[in-house]
C-alpha cells in the first residue's frame, strides 16, 4: 500500500455517478450474471429474513458484541449477490466493509496476509480510499474518541504491543508537520512493518527518556492489528 501527502495518498475521485450510466451497468451485469454493485442496488436480495438477521448482527457489533453469519449454497445460488447486498446495507448503516477471498495467496491460517487483504479492500460509504486511510485522515487528535483510543491502547488489558500507543502519539504530533512520518505510521496500522530504531528515536525526540518497544512476532502483531483496527475506525466515526 502506497501512501503520500498530507491527505494520506490515493487520488480522490467523484463518488457520484450518472444514473443512466449506473442503470446501463446494472443491465449489463445482469446479462452476464455478475453481481455488480449497480445490479445489486437495483434488484436487492429478496432475502428479507437474512437482512433482518444481519441488521441485528450489525447493531450488536456497534454495541461491542461482535458476531457472525455463515451463508451456504450451491454454484449460482446467489451467494455473491447476497454478500454484495449485505455489504451495501452495512455501508449505508455507517460501517466499514471489507471482503476477503480465502485462497492459496490469502490462507486463513496466516493472519498477516488475511489482515493485509482485509485492509486493502476495506471501504467506507462514498469514499474512494481504503477505510483505514480514511480513518487516519478523519481522526480528531484533540477529540475525546482519539483520547479514549490512546488510553485503551496503552492499557495492559488491550494486550497490544507498545508500538500501537507510541504510533498514535507520534501521529498526533506529525500529521500536520511531517506527512512522510505520518504516512509511515498509517502504513504500520495497515500492516506494514515499522523501523523500531526510527520509532524509538522519534519517541525520544518527543520527550520519552527510555522508550520501550518489546519484541513481537509478525503473526502476533497481525492478531493485535485485528483488535486495533476496529477501534481506530470507531474513533474516526465509523460504527464498526
Image: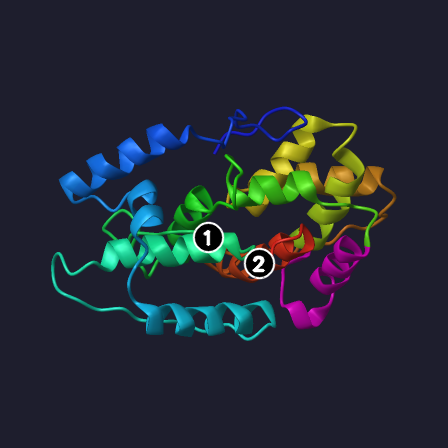
Report the front residue among 217 and 29: 29
Residue that mark 1 sits on: 97
Is 153 in the magenta? yes
Q: Is residue 57 left or right of residue 209?
A: left
Give the SS element for disc 1: loop
Report the front residue among 69 and 6: 69
What secondary structure is the magenta-colored segment mainly? helix
Indicate the position of residue 61 as horizontal and vertical percent values.
Answer: 54, 69
Quadrant of image for the C terminus? bottom right
Q: Is residue 213 left or right of residue 17?
A: right
Indicate the position of residue 138 as horizontal and vertical percent values.
Answer: 68, 42
> With respect to residue 126, does 48 lie above or below?
below
Picture quarter containing residue 153?
bottom right
- Identify the residue at horizontal 20%, vertical 43% (top origin): 34
Instruction: Work out how far the residue at label 2 is from the one at label 1, CA to CA, in angstroms.
Output: 11 Å
Indicate the position of residue 83 as horizontal and vertical percent values.
Answer: 32, 57
Question: Magenta stretch?
Answer: 144-162
Residue that mark 2 sits on: 230
Amino acid at each position: 500500500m502506497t501512501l503520500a501527502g498530507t491527505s494520506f495518498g490515493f487520488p480522490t475521485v467523484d463518488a457520484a455517478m450518472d444514473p443512466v450510466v449506473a442503470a446501463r451497468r446494472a443491465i449489463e451485469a445482469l446479462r452476464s450474471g455478475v453481481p455488480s454493485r449497480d445490479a445489486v442496488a437495483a434488484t436487492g436480495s429478496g432475502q428479507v429474513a437474512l437482512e433482518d438477521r444481519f441488521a441485528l448482527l450489525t447493531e450488536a457489533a456497534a454495541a461491542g458484541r461482535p458476531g457472525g453469519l455463515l451463508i451456504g449454497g450451491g454454484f449460482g445460488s446467489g451467494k455473491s449477490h447476497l454478500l454484495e447486498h449485505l455489504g451495501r446495507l452495512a455501508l449505508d448503516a455507517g460501517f466499514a466493509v471489507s471482503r476477503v477471498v480465502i485462497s492459496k495467496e490469502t490462507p486463513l491460517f496466516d493472519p498477516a496476509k488475511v489482515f493485509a487483504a482485509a485492509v486493502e479492500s476495506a471501504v467506507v460509504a462514498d469514499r474512494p480510499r481504503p477505510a483505514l486511510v480514511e480513518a487516519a485522515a478523519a481522526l480528531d487528535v484533540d477529540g475525546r474518541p482519539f483520547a479514549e483510543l490512546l488510553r485503551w491502547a496503552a492499557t495492559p488489558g488491550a494486550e497490544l504491543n507498545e508500538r500501537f500507543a507510541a504510533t498514535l502519539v507520534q501521529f498526533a504530533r506529525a500529521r500536520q508537520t511531517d506527512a512522510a512520518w505520518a504516512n509511515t505510521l498509517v502504513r504500520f496500522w495497515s500492516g506494514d512493518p515499522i523501523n523500531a530504531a526510527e520509532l524509538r528515536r522519534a519517541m525520544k525526540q518527543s520527550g520519552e527518556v527510555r522508550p520501550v518497544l518489546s519484541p513481537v512476532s509478525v503473526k502476533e502483531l497481525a492478531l493485535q492489528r485485528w483488535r486495533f483496527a476496529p477501534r481506530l475506525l470507531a474513533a474516526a466515526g465509523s460504527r464498526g
